[in-house]
Structure formats: C-alpha cells, structure tokens
C-alpha cells in the first residue's frame, strides 16, 4: 500500500479514536494495531511480539527513571510551604518595578520550574499562592491570570523538564545537553513576559497598585528563597558538574526535598503517602503514553511513513525556514487537541527526520518543540494551564484564554528569536559540554 495512504489511514484513525473520547494511550495502541493489520496484514502473534519488545525496552530504560522521581519531587514541594516561602522571598525584589507583585508570577514560576519539570504543577502551585493574594491587593485580574498562564508553561522548558527527558529518549540525544539548551530560552521568555508586564503597567498604572517596600526585609526574603534555591543548586549542580546523570540527579533532588521537609518540620506520613500516590498516578499516565507512542512509532516505521514523509518534503523543495514555519502551524493545531507529552511522542517519528535532514541541530529542535508544546498549554480547548487557572479563580475559560493571548504572542516571538538565532539555545550546551 502507498505510504501516503498509510499515513492518511493512521491520521484518520487517530482523529477517530481521540474524537470518541478514548484515553490517549489506548487510542495509540488501537491505531498502531489497526494500522499494522489493515496496511501490512500482520498476524496478531507478530503484533504481540513487537509490543512485548517495546514494553521490555521501555521498562529497562534508565533515562525514564527520572520521570517518576522528578514528579514525586514536585508533588512533595506542592504539599509543603516551600511555594509560599517562594512568594514571600520574591516580593521585595519586584515590588518597586512597574507591575509590582504581578512579576511574582513570572519569577516564582521560573524558579519553581527549575525543581518541578511540569507545567501544570508549576501553574497550580504558584497560582494557588498568588491569584488570591494579587486579587486581594487590587491588581488587575486579567493581567495576573494571563501572566500565570504564560509563566506556568515554563515548567516544560526550564530544566529539569519531563517533556525534554521524553524527547531525549525518543530522539536519542543527550538529556544533559537538552537541559542546558533550555535554560537561556526559558530565561529569555521570562524576561519578555516581565518586560511586557512592566510596559503595560507603566502605561496603565491602575492595573497595579504601588507597594510599600519597607514592609519587606531582604534578609527574610533570602531565607525564604533559600529552600528553593538550594534544591535548584543541588539538582542542576549534580548534572552539570558531571557527578550525576539526570536520573541520578532526580534521586538526589528527592532526597534533598525530603531533607528540606524534615528541616522545615513539614514532613509527615500523610504528606509522603499523598505525594507518592500523586506521583504514581501521574507517572503511570506518562509512561503508558510513552509505551503506546513507541509502539505507534514502530508501526509507522514498518509502514515507512516517516521516511516517505521526509521524501515528500524533500520533493517540495522547502527551505529550512519554510519547513519550520509549517511545523510551527502543525504543532499549534495539535496543541488545540492534545497534551504536550502526547504531541511529542506522536509527532517526533514524522518530524525529526526532515528537520535533521534540513541541517537543524536535534538539540535545537528539542527546544523548539518544547516551546511549541508550551504554546499548546495556552490554547483552548485542551490548554491545561487554562483549565488549572479556571479551577483556581472561577473565571470562565473564554476570559482566561483572552487574558493569556498576549503571553501566547510573546511566546511566538520567542520561538521566532531562537529560530533566527539558534545560538540562544545551543551556546550553553557547547560551553558546558563542548
């Protein structure tokens, strides 16, 4: 059967199963099985053997061990007062800047992202603290919600990032280099957000009341920031010093979080059980999607879909930037319907080969892909950050989406910058790893 027709069958099946409300990992398994049966007439025994090999390979992947550990780390932080300390600690440094405490959404999310790895966890944790407080102090609710929708998505880009780990495993590139590549683009996007907030509030001072800085102590702020900064230093220091792999650094981070919880007298049996159960649920979801996506990738490989898509793109004689523009639109459309992990694992078998063939660095493409996934976190109807904020604030989803629009456009601008100047993403990995 023609590969183009095979790809079309796979696409129709994916839309059919996902549109019916079937769980993502079940949809992927069904699509893969149907594709192998309908297109290649594979017998059930052979399909079972292929799936068995993929299950064994995924279960024995050391890199994937980092995912449940980082998730557990984020769950424990979410249930302690470390996030509240983070808000208090950031306050003195932003209170006099135009926009005042709205900047705590950006700075707080940036710092929390460096120990979480999850966009939803970052948005929920920081939002739980700031949304009520900012509303009580008279800050514009729309700007507050929008900044949190944008900054919360940085949990996917600033290391450690779960999506980056998944990309590194599937694309077979260094996860440590990916982590390093995400730092400068993440800080750049955070600066774009803060600059927009400052300019908007300078033009319209009524959006943010003036704060009295004398009520805040820099010494107490430093002490409040110490727990989160120490965790960032331990996790990232272990990776970039070469003392630990990302998976080992995740274990170090869990141990550090447990020790912090003990020192802060926050650690309890209930916290351990609740955080473990939350981590198990999330990890099971992520890993099941990964296995199903690996099966889909293998099935499409048997059907020669990625190779023929790459050939079709080559025949179109697209320029490098034209290809990236088409992929950007493609990922924004996917972001309307799928979560970030699903987007990554479903699209990579098709998109990676043409991008590398065009001469793009796979490390750079990993950062580009994560930025596009972050855009999906801010687009209805499946923008998870929007739903998290709707639940926290009670504001209708359409108003949350409108509030997030300026930050969505700023993220698009950030994607354009790293496309024009890929050194923004590639400079730090080159300096650290050569």
Image (cartoon, helix red, strand yellow):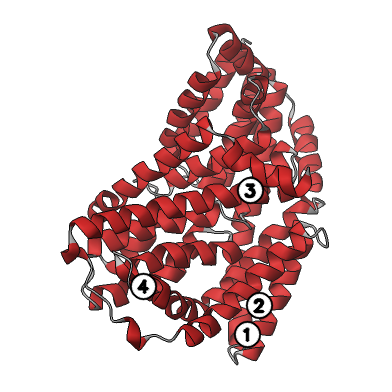
Q: Which residue is mark 2?
A: 257
**Closer to us: 396 or 221:** 221
Quarter of the view holding residue 261 = bottom right
What's the distance in space between the residues labelled 1 and 3, CA to CA? 27 Å
Locate residue 115, reporting x and y percent.
Answer: 60, 66
Q: Earlier in the sequence, mark 3 or mark 2?
A: 3
Disc 1 + disc 2, Cβ < 8 Å: yes
Instruction: Name the residue rendered at 54%, 53% in the picture.
Output: 156
Q: Which residue is mark 1?
A: 261
Residue 130 is tagged as: 4
What's the distance in space between the residues labelled 3 and 2, CA to CA? 22 Å
Locate residue 32, reporting x and y percent.
Answer: 63, 32
What's the distance in space between the residues labelled 3 and 4, CA to CA? 27 Å
Disc 1 + disc 3, Cβ < 8 Å: no
Quarter of the view holding residue 242 = bottom right
What's the distance in space between the residues labelled 1 and 2, CA to CA? 6 Å
Instruction: Name the residue rendered at 71%, 70% in the picture.
Output: 234
């Amino acid at each position: 059967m023609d590969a183009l027709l095979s790809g079309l069958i796979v696409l129709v099946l994916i839309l059919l199963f996902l549109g019916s409300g079937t769980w993502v990992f079940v949809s992927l398994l069904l699509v893969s099985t149907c594709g192998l049966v309908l297109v290649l007439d594979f017998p059930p025994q052979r399909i079972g053997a292929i799936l068995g090999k993929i299950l064994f390979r995924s279960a024995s992947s050391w890199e994937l061990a980092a995912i449940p550990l980082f998730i557990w780390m984020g769950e424990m932080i979410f249930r302690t007062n470390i996030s509240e300390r983070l808000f208090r600690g950031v306050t003195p440094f932003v209170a006099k800047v135009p926009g005042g405490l709205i900047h705590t959404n950006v700075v707080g999310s940036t710092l929390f992202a460096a120990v979480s790895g999850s966009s939803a966890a970052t948005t929920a944790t920081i939002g739980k603290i700031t949304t009520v407080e900012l509303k009580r102090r008279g800050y514009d609710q729309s700007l507050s919600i929008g900044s949190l929708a944008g900054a919360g998505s940085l949990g996917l880009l600033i290391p450690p990032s779960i999506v980056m780990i998944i990309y590194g495993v599937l694309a077979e590139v260094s996860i440590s280099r990916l982590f390093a590549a995400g730092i400068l683009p993440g800080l750049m996007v955070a600066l774009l957000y803060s600059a927009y907030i400052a300019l908007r509030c300078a033009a319209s001072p009524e959006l943010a009341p003036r704060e009295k800085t004398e009520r805040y102590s820099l010494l107490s702020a430093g002490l409040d920031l110490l727990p989160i900064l120490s965790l960032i230093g331990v996790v990232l220091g272990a990776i970039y010093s070469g003392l630990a792999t990302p998976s080992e650094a995740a274990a170090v981070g869990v141990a550090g979080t447990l020790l912090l919880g003990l020192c802060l007298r926050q650690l309890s049996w209930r916290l351990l059980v609740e955080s473990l159960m939350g981590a198990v649920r999330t990890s099971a979801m992520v890993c099941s999607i990964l296995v199903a996506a690996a099966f889909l990738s293998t099935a499409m490989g048997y059907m020669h879909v990625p190779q023929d898509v790459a050939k079709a793109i080559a025949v179109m004689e697209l320029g490098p930037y034209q290809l990236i523009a088409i992929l950007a639109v493609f990922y924004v459309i996917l972001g309307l319907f799928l979560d970030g992990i699903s987007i990554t694992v479903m699209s990579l078998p098709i998109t990676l080969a043409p991008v590398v063939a065009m001469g793009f660095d796979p490390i750079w493409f990993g950062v580009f892909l994560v930025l596009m996934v972050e855009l999906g976190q801010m687009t209805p109807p499946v923008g998870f950050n929007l739903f998290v904020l709707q639940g926290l604030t009670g504001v209708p989803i359409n108003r949350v989406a409108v509030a997030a629009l300026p930050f969505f456009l700023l993220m698009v601008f950030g994607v354009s910058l790293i496309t024009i100047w890929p050194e923004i993403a590639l400079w730090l990995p080159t300096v650290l790893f050569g």
